[in-house]
Image (tube, rainbow, N blue to C red):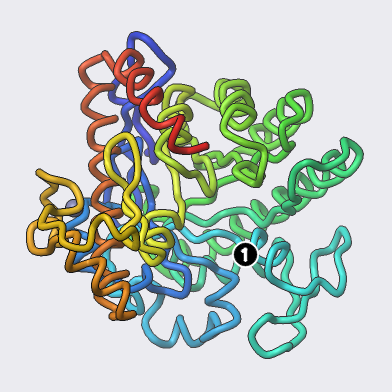
């Protein structure tokens, strides 16, 4: 059984409405995944996550492998038990954080060796280890280990990154096949409906020829889904959108497409127009912790003194817990006093805002008018995002 079904398409764009099936349930796409960096979406209980409408969340392998360690996660009953979340979980491979947080001591075709940013310990990570850690923690969607590089990068460097990502993807696929066959042998109940999934990653920066080559190579290996990596790393909205518009159609229509680490509402709208199905980003919670609230077509900065005696909710009409109970003035006060409720309330609102955006996107695709609606929405957001 395929893990993904396209149940509708838009008449004015490449947008698709789909259903992704995992071992822990189904996900309506296009979908947004809140990020649970260290096994928790910062400050948010699973109850509130569920109330936001989230159906799938992301956990970071890099952070969990360093602390508490994959073995501890396993002995605590796996990732779902640790996070008290019995719905789908996608884990990244650790690659992105290794290249952005870890102090690299070695990188070659075999893998990487880095110094932990927590205790300075030497840690090794490669295609096989990254796949095995995610598999053993019980992730529903496992990501291939890839090399990431900031943009702009020179073409030769981007080419090397892409070659290595391809070689590592083959190794992830082989290791995953071995692990899956072992599980199947141990558990005769394991069927295609409840097995773990493996996604490949297409790199290539904003170089379209390189994106094409990477897409062809990764598709040839064959994965349950395909991600676009190496974007939202400083290239800007226009360049990102152009790259996604070019690359998404190179991926199989019957597999989910995931744009990693994206992004602002305008980035999501543009990528859905291009046929992307899945997103993740820390923005709803990170911005919430920084007193920044997402509202339709813009943003509110709650530290601003104009909110001091405002009795309005963050977003009139919003059904989230924050907007139903608290005034802008109260939330501003919490931030001023460094009361932890401030960041929690704004994270609750921002997460709900993102899930409501995704629900609207899905409704418009179902109606077949997404292309028209999204262009109008994009115009509202682009100014704010600059
Ligand atoms: Zn709200």
Q: Is residue 182 above or below residue 203?
A: below
Q: Quadrant of residue 209?
A: top right
**Which residue is pictured at 49% across the width and 40% down the height?**
258
Q: Of helix, strand and loop, which one carries label 1?
A: loop
Horizontal side of residue 301 vs 105, given as left or right: left
For this rendering, which residue is in front, 298 or 160? 298
> Who's the residue at 41% across and 58% down the image?
287
- For residue 207, say whether it is visible: yes
Badge 1 crowding class, 10 Å Cα cut-off, few under 14, some 14 to 19, many 20 or more, is many
User: How many numbered badges does the structure rendering display?
Assistant: 1
Rendering coords of residue 324 (x, y %): 8, 57
- The residue lying furthest to the right in this view is 156
Residue 129 on image: x %, y %: 67, 70
> For residue 160, which quarter of the picture?
top right
Q: Residue at x 72, y 48 (%)?
A: 170
Nearer to me, 182 or 248: 248
* Disc 1 target residue: 94
Whether residue 190 appears in this view of the structure is no
Q: Position of residue 12 (x, y in %)?
A: 37, 9
Q: Within 8 Å: ligand 1 and the Cβ of disc 1?
A: no
Image quarter where the N terminus lies is: top left
Q: Quadrant of residue 321?
A: bottom left
Q: Identify whether 58 is placed above or below 118.
A: above
């Amino acid at each position: 059984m395929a893990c993904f079904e396209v149940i509708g398409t838009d008449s004015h764009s490449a947008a698709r409405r789909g259903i992704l099936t995992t071992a822990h349930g189904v996900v309506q796409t296009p979908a947004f995944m809140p990020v649970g960096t260290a096994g928790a979406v910062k400050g948010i209980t699973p109850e509130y996550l569920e109330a936001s409408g989230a159906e799938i969340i992301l956990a970071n392998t890099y952070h969990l492998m360093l602390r508490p360690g994959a073995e501890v996660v396993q002995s605590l009953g796996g990732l779902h038990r640790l996070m008290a979340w019995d719905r789908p979980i996608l884990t990244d491979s650790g690659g992105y954080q290794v290249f952005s947080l870890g102090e690299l001591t070695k990188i070659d075709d075999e893998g990487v060796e880095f110094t932990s940013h927590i205790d300075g310990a030497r840690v090794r990570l490669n295609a096989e280890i990254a796949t095995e850690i995610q598999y053993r923690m019980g992730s529903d969607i496992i990501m291939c280990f890839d090399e990431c590089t900031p943009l702009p990068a020179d073409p030769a460097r981007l080419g090397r990154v892409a070659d290595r990502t391809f070689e590592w993807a083959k190794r992830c696929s082989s290791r995953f096949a071995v692990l899956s066959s072992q599980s199947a042998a141990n558990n005769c109940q394991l069927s295609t409906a409840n097995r773990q999934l493996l996604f490949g990653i297409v790199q290539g920066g904003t170089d379209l020829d390189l994106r094409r080559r990477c897409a062809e190579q990764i598709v040839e290996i064959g994965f349950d889904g395909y991600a676009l990596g190496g974007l939202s790393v400083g290239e800007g909205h226009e360049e990102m959108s152009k790259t996604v518009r070019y690359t998404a159609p190179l991926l199989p229509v019957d597999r989910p497409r995931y744009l990693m680490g994206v992004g602002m509402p305008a980035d999501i709208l543009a990528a859905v127009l291009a046929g992307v199905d899945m997103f993740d980003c820390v923005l709803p919670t990170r911005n919430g912790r920084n007193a920044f609230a997402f509202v339709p077509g813009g943003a509110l900065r709650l530290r601003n003194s104009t909110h001091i005696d405002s009795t309005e909710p963050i977003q009139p009409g919003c059904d989230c817990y924050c907007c139903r109970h608290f005034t802008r003035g109260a939330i501003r006060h919490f931030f001023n006093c460094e009361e932890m409720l401030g960041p929690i309330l704004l994270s609750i609102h921002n997460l709900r805002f993102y899930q409501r955006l995704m629900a609207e996107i899905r409704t418009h695709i179902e109606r077949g008018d997404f292309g028209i609606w999204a262009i109008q929405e994009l115009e509202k957001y682009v100014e704010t995002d600059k």
